[in-house]
Amino acid sequence: MTNQPKRILTTHVGSLIRPADLIAFVRARLANQAYDETAYEQCLHNTVADVVRHQAKIGLDIVNDGEFGKSHWYRYAIERLSGVDTRPAKSGVKPALFAGRDRERFPEFYAEYDKTMPYGGPILETVVSEPIAYRGQAILRRDIGNLKQALAGVKVVSGFLPVVAPASLLPEFKDEYYGSEEKCVFAIAEALREEYQGIVDAGLILQIDDAWLVGIYDRMVPPATPADYRKWVGMCTDALNHALRDIPEDRTRYHICWGSWNGPHTADVPLKDIVDLLLKLRVGGYSIEMANPRHEHEWRIWEEVKLPPGRVLLPGVISHATNIVEHPELVAERITRLAKLVGRENVIGSTDCGFAQGAFYQRVHPSIMWAKLEALVEGARLASRTLWS
């Protein structure tokens, strides 16, 4: 995960907007409608090749498959695990997604905002009724194969695949087997370890996505206390370290964000309250929102907090939540001020979050997404000239 000499590398968080022909197949699959499986697999293969070529063309260094093989950034894992089932939620029961202090403060905004989101269908709950185990080997091999074949045709530094962290599945699961959150999250971690190991063994960089680790704060506190929340975070990071045991740190990176939606975010947990716990993770890099106007000021944390040796920051210097395309000089400024604190060789320019957290999501128009990524690349070039002048 260390940076290349004399240049700031660039990457992104992972999820890119799916093309229409692929979305049509995903929609049919999720609705249990008839579709041509061979045609779907060929479409997926071709669209992954296209999106990798496009990333390379604009100059991104560490690229991925856009998460095109997944229906959603974390719910994809449910189809890859045994011991869990989905069923309609009880009437009147709202999932964690529809709770929290931000929603209590701005109910009129969220009433309108929710109508624009592609939730669709009945509200389901995911139930743990048996021991959790990994069963997604064939799908994982497909995703790895599609990405590696696409990488063979381009010139980039490396490829990565995002996967979910145990903590970001835990709030979704209703445990009817293990009897405690700790046992359940460690069981999730042990199952996901097979996915983590498979990606690293394939020569790719492993990215662990953990938006719910921080996103759950405004749903938990109150009635829980900040101390209760830190204890929960500590349990979850211990579980992730358990899953990462023996996996080389320099082949991993860890992503957090405060939820990808473009809402007020007035009840987010401050980074300073949990950064010490995050730095205990056995990972090579930290991908953190730093273009989000609710969190951009937190770059100053690194004036006092020391980045552990051998690790890098992948700051979000491009926002996924606004249609305004950042000026490359602003991108360069965001990169440069961090590089002067943690070392120029320890910064890789990235985005705040993905541009499409699920197959049906589209945070900005595709043309704007690519313009933003181009601004990221150009901003990194400007920063490199300054930092290595």
Image (cartoon, rainbow, N blue to C red):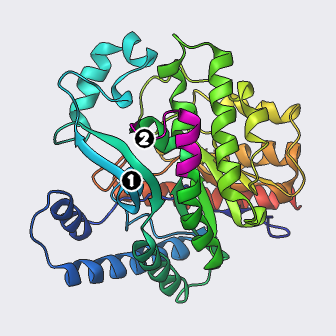
Residue 351 in picture, x, y percent from top left: 57, 50
Mark 1 crowdedness (10 Å alpha carbons): few <14, some 14-19, many ≥20: some
In the picture, residue 289 is in which quadrant?
top right
Residue 10 in picture, x, y percent from top left: 65, 62
Instruction: Name the residue beneath numbered marker 2.
Output: 177
The label shown at residue 83 is 1
Decide if residue 201 is in sight here.
yes
Quarter placement of the C terminus: bottom right
Q: Residue at x 45, y 52 (%)?
A: 131
> Does residue 299 appear to the left or right of 330 in the view shown?
right
Quarter placement of the N terminus: bottom right
Circle 2: element type: loop
Check residue 160 for magenta coloring.
no
Q: Residue at x 31, y 14 (%)?
A: 107
For badge 2, the amino acid type reads Tyr
From which residue to which does the magenta span run?
Answer: 175-188
Tell me if residue 158 comes above or below residue 389 in the rendering: below
Residue 184 in picture, x, y percent from top left: 52, 42
In the picture, residue 348 is in which quadrant?
bottom right
Q: Residue at x 33, y 26 (%)?
A: 98
For badge 1, the amino acid type reads Gly
The furthest residue to the left: 34
Circle 1: element type: strand
Judge by depth and name the residue closer to the eye, 203 or 93: 93
